Image (cartoon, helix red, strand yellow):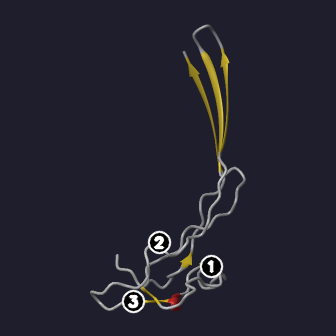
Amino acid sequence: TQRVNQVSDDPYADRSINPANGGMRYLDLAAFAQPALGTLGTMKRNSIEGIGSRNVDLSISRAFRVATTARFEIRAEAFNALNWFQWNQPNVTLSSPIFGQITSAGDPRIIQLAAKFVF
């Protein structure tokens, strides 16, 4: 919960892949330092931008009338429909061995189908 000292103007790393764990280096460990116990760090709140994201969700549905009071509905939904690869946010725990690295990805494309009979 304590803010760190930012000792470099550029806190971002070169975005290369770490061969040890396959994570992307996003923040530079050398750009940050742990402040003295009981003091506030020099880093401003919300001063680092996370990795961006983009997403397209689609839904298609069709209802068919079966009788005067009944209908049948079919629905298809696709989440991350274009299947864009998206990194998650970096690890921000300064004492962690993977500080500043992104080691996981977001959800892949998910497709679900549904049918409903209303009477």
Please, is residue 86 above or below residue 97 in the view?
above
In this picture, residue 41 sits left or right of residue 68 = left
Report the residue marked by disc 3.
34
Check disc 1: other Cα within 10 Å, few if <14, some if 14-19, many if 20+.
Answer: few
Please, is residue 84 above or below residue 15 in the view?
above
Q: As shown in the figure, which amino acid type bears the numbered disc 2?
A: Asn
Q: As shown in the figure, which amino acid type bears the numbered disc 1?
A: Gly
Q: Residue furthest top?
A: 68
- Labels 1 and 2: the sequence-earlier one: 1
Please, is residue 34 above or below residue 52 in the view?
below
Check disc 2: other Cα within 10 Å, few if <14, some if 14-19, many if 20+.
Answer: few
Q: Which mark is residue 22?
A: 1
Residue 28: x and y, percent?
55, 86
Residue 47: x and y, percent?
49, 75
Residue 72: x and y, percent?
63, 21
| Quadrant into which the C terminus falls | top right
Report the residue marked by disc 2.
46
Q: Do tag 1 and tag 2 residues touch (Cβ < 8 Å)?
A: no
- Labels 3 and 1: the sequence-earlier one: 1
Q: Do tag 2 and tag 3 residues touch (Cβ < 8 Å)?
A: no
Q: Nearer the viewer, mark 1 or mark 2?
A: 2
**Secondary structure type for disc 3:** loop
Q: As shown in the figure, which amino acid type bears the numbered disc 3?
A: Gln
Q: CA distance from mark 1 to mark 2?
A: 27 Å
Check disc 3: other Cα within 10 Å, few if <14, some if 14-19, many if 20+.
Answer: some
**Secondary structure type for disc 2:** loop
Q: Report the residue at 65% width, 29% height from top.
A: 74
